[in-house]
Structures are given as structure tokens and as C-alpha cells.
Amino acid sequence: MGRTSKVGRSRTPAADRILRAASEMFYREGIRAVGVDAIAAEADVTKKTLYEKYGSKDRLVAAYVRARDERWRSWLLGVVERRGGTARERLLSTFDALAEWMERENPRGCGFVNAAAELPHADHPARVVVMEQKAWMRGYLAELAAEGGAENPEDLAERLVILHEGATVAFSLGMAEDAAQKARQIAALLVADLQ
Amino acid sequence: MGRTSKVGRSRTPAADRILRAASEMFYREGIRAVGVDAIAAEADVTKKTLYEKYGSKDRLVAAYVRARDERWRSWLLGVVERRGGTARERLLSTFDALAEWMERENPRGCGFVNAAAELPHADHPARVVVMEQKAWMRGYLAELAAEGGAENPEDLAERLVILHEGATVAFSLGMAEDAAQKARQIAALLVADLQ
DNA sequence: TAGTAAACATACCGGTATGTATAGTAACAG
DNA sequence: CTGTTACTATACATACCGGTATGTTTACTA
């Protein structure tokens, strides 16, 4: 009977519109820049409904980060799976997934990094999700690295994470042309040992 | 007789305290999370004085970014100059400068990236400064790359920028141990051609 | 057809945001 | 001793913030 007792049930249409509107606005304008009134208006919903569905702005922000994470993961895994190949090739495919993702969904940089910038406190529910997301990404790359027979999979994963994050920032602040492509080429140097 | 007519004169003690307090608070808590009242209180100054010195919060934010940029540049150039060596060695020294900077002044990641996350609008005075800062960094690395005889200095600079930004994000979100050190090692691979 | 869930409309709360106004004080330079 | 600079103190204007209250409508379904 907790306040999250609806977990598992499908979201109502209104709850869906709220999350969609919030996600778009939080990412584009920044979290603190967007008020709940504006979200409710954009979702064509009353504030009452918003608070019945999400409880508080902080929890809505957490839901936004979680939803974005789900979209990114399924996109990433989809691309990597579709391309297939050896573990080495799949490690490099993550940069192809990143390249397309950035063009289509990431003009303002990494939504998780941006959220962390606005939410410094470690116990904020959304920041917890961000940290989990970043840990997952590192773990995923480490798995692929291990599968590819890397001498030190964790170490390789950390280096690839640096390239992922760097490409994202460089892209969004206009510091590099084809940032993901360049990051991929550098990654290829690191991964070459695995062959 | 514009509103910035005092440029060139030395800052008053109060103006100095305001900028110092604002810098610390903006970086630690986020820009939108910090109100002008709190800054004035922390600087032991009245709001009136704050507005006489900086005109608006937006201009104070721009001053914060500018001051941070100045500190970073002088730290970076100082380290690179002190270490000396060939252009190749100086390119790698930028990662040593980054490593120490992060330990001492950057626990919350890149202040410029964080500011850009909170200020999406291209014409915000502080965002303009951020973009200049990032362009300068890229240009500085390109200069060193050219001096080192790189085949394509701009291209090399962009790859090094990716490593700088990636190391910063990975460090601040706990994704990599010794991120700057790892980035430096990768950079060494890229720079090896210059020898 | 009665009951229930999901949503509606509207108005309000205390608090805080940026920015301004009025009036006064301390130090110093001509 | 007069004027200027740099500040203090306090109060105000206006708008928006997250969050809540009361009551109504719509649509499905048992």
C-alpha cells in the first residue's frame, strides 16, 4: 500500500503524457528551469493529476531519468545486437550507437550528466538513478571487454567510458566534428590487442 | 559611460567577496539553485551592492564563468610551462594539469559543462563565455599539435579534447580510477606519431 | 443503474525568486 | 569642510515556485 503501489500496472494515458512532456522539457530547458505548472499545461493535464501520478517534482525527475535510461539502453543494445560480430566489434559498435543517438536525441549533451550538474546532492532520487546508469554502462563495456579476452576488462572499460563521455561533451559543445567517429577510431586502437 | 565602464579599474573588496562567494556556491550547488540573497549574505554584503557591482544575476554568472576560466587557463599554462619539453611532452602535460586541477578544484566536474547544462540559450552571456572557453582550449591544443608537427593539428586537437572532457566526466561521476592518467596514456598513443 | 477510477476546474497556501527604492553612514580627497 | 565613493540597512514590488484543497465531470463496468 505504499505510494508506489501501482508499479507494474500500465501507465494511464495522462501519466504517459506527463512523463513525455516532462522528459522533453527537462532535457531541453534544464530541470530547475521547468516548473510543474508548465509541464501540466504542456501535457494537457491538471496539476492535481500530475501530483496523483508522481507524488512530487523530484520523483517526476527521477522518472524522467529512468525513462531516458531505458530508451538509451534499448537503443544501445539493439544496435550492438543488430550489428553482431566479435566482442571487439561489438565494443566498437557502441560508438556507432552513440553517434546516431547524439544526432537524433542528444543535441544538448548527456541528459544524465546534465541532471547530475543540476542535482549535486547524492541522495536525490534522480541522482541515484544517474549513478546507477553510469555504473551500468561501465559494467556493460567491462562485460564485452572480458568476453573479448581483455587482459584487464575493467581497465579497458574505463578507457572506453572516457571516450564515450568525451565524445558526447565535445559534440554538444561544438568542440569536434564527428566526435563519436573519432572516439571510435581511438577505441579501435585500444581494442586492437584483443584480436 | 556604459554599464561596464569600470572595466580596467581594480575591483573593490566587496565586489571581490561577491564574486568569490558566487563562484563557490554556483559551482557547488548549481547556478539556478543559488539565489542572489544567499550570495549577498555569504559575501557579507547587501543586495544593493551586489546589483551595483554586477547589474544582474546573469551578468554575475558570466563573471563567475570568466573568473573560473582565468584560473583554469593560468593553472594550465603554468603547469605546461613549468614542465617544458617538446611540443609532444607539453601536449601530455595538459593531462597532468587536469589531474591536479580535478583533485583540487573540480570534484563536481567541469564548471563550464555544468553551466552549459543549466543555460541552454545560446545568447546567455555566461554561455557565450563557456563557448569561448571551449574554443580556446581546442585552439590551444591545436597550436601545440601544430608546433609538434602534427599532420592534421586540428584533428589531433579534437581527439585530445575528447580525452580531456571524457576524463573530467568519468572522474566526477566515479566511472574511472585515475581518469586523467588513463586519458594521458591514450593521448600518448595519439601523439606518438609526432616523434 | 449504481459505483468507481481517472481525470477535470479553480483557487489557494507559504515561501522564495530577481530586482528596485529610500535613507543613511564611514572614509577620504580637493 | 565639502563632495564623492563605497558601502549598510530595510523595505518593497512583482512574479513564480512546489504543493494542496474542494468540488465536478466523464466513461467504463459489475
Image: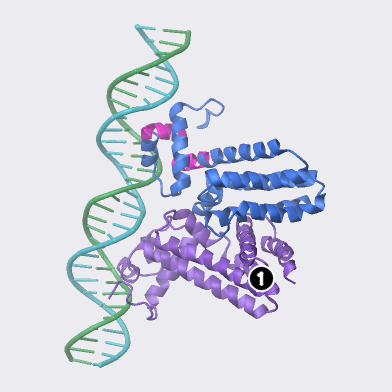
Chain colours: A purple, B blue, C green, D cyan
Residue sitting at x 76%, y 52% = B191
How many marks the image carries: the answer is 1
Q: Is residue A56 visible?
A: yes
Q: Residue furthest front?
A: A151
Residue at 76 percent across and 40 percent down: it is: B85
Q: Which corner quadrant of the image does residue B13 belong to?
A: top left
Q: Position of residue B59 (x, y in %)?
A: 49, 40
Q: Is residue B168 left or right of residue A13?
A: right
Q: Classify B5 as above or below A40.
A: above
Chain of the residue under label 1: A
Mark 1 = which residue? A91
In this picture, residue A81 sits left or right of residue B13: right
Q: Which residues are magenta?
A: B44-63
The type of residue carrying mark 1 is Leu
Tell me if residue B48 is in the magenta stretch: yes
What percent of the width, then of the height, locates residue A181? 70, 64
